[in-house]
Amino acid sequence: MGLSNNAKVYLEAFYSGPKIQDLTPDVVRQALNAPVPEGVEVPPVAKVENRQIPVHEGEITVRIYTPEGEGPFPLFVYYHGGGWVLGNLETSDAGCRLLAENTKRVVVSVDYRLAPEFKYPVPVEDSYAALCWAHDHADELNAIADDIVVGGDSAGGNLATIMTILTEENDGPAISAQALIYPVTNLDFTTASYEKFADGFGLDKDLMIWFGEYYVNSEEDYKNVDVSPLLCEDVSALPPAIIVAAENDVLLDEGAQYRDKLKDAGVKVEYTVLPGSIHGYFSNMAVFADETKETVNAIAQFLNALKVNS
């Protein structure tokens, strides 16, 4: 497996400084909050609005992206990546703008609370609260409550997948599809791709372990379905899924395993591996604009095909 030129450029810069796993979350977050580099195109949408919504013992922010057109539009609830420790509304802003316009959905991007200040299950609970809020407030968002897609990248893909399980268990909002970008599906760290891409590809094996240790409270938590959704025994009632994997990624195998689990249960799945890519490209438009656009186009085509065939 080779690396794209964009990936090579990114990794050279990424490894020119200290490794994330050798730093504290606060230090890394400050670096992530740097302004978007000049010259990076910000995809246009009709409207962007931040709202504060209630969650258990607090509030979180959601950012609402409305596409051009009259509506009402179907919904897309999006969860950002960052290992449940990093990431925010800004790191997923460009991707969410593209999703809104290309899928013609109102995108609700969720700024769930982060570990280690808010360890598991708080990010899961915040994510579900935001899903329910989007459903319940669809009318005022010029959106359609009974057509919701959930999606996310990395840890956000993990949360999106867990939302499909929780809403099924709790008779919550109906979810039409799940759109997962290199999702975490099993915090096990033992697949062949974990060994093959353990170091030097951005998301090191040690970094994933670092994320996990900040996120969970105990070893038992790793085996919970709402941490490792691949362990869900019955996925037959879950919605159709598109999974976009990065070719050079420790999470490659568990994305394929989740695909196989859904397919074996009779769930419609589309799976694609982006050649030459690495984990994290979706939250870095400055380097990976082409890869991000390709991913969004694949998601839009998958969702459009679902409508045609429904």
Image: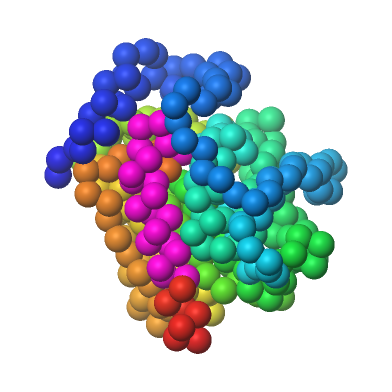
| Picture residue at 61% right of the left edge, 58% below the top | 68
Q: Is residue 287 magenta?
A: yes
Picture quadrant of residue 225: bottom right
Q: Nearer the viewer, residue 279 or 167?
A: 279
Task: Answer with left or right where residue 118 lies relative to residue 184.
Answer: right
User: Is the magenta region chiefly helix, strand or loop?
Assistant: helix
Task: Answer with left or right where residue 223 lies relative to residue 106.
Answer: left
Q: Is residue 37 magenta?
A: no
Task: Answer with left or right where residue 275 lies relative to residue 48.
Answer: left
Task: Answer with left or right where residue 138 lies relative to residue 106.
Answer: right
Q: Tell me, yes or no, if residue 201 can be seen here.
A: yes
- 40 relative to 184, above or below: above
- The x, y position of residue 64, in whole percent, is 69, 50
In the current view of this chain or complex, which residue is farthest to the top?
A: 17
Q: Nearer the viewer, residue 45 or 265?
A: 45
Q: Which residues are magenta?
A: 283-303
| Picture residue at 30% right of the left edge, 40% below the top | 278
What is the count of numbered marks? 0
Q: Tell me, yes or no, if residue 215 can be seen here.
A: no
| Picture residue at 42% right of the left edge, 43% below the top | 282
- The x, y position of residue 197, in whole percent, is 25, 38
Q: Nearer the viewer, residue 268 or 140?
A: 140
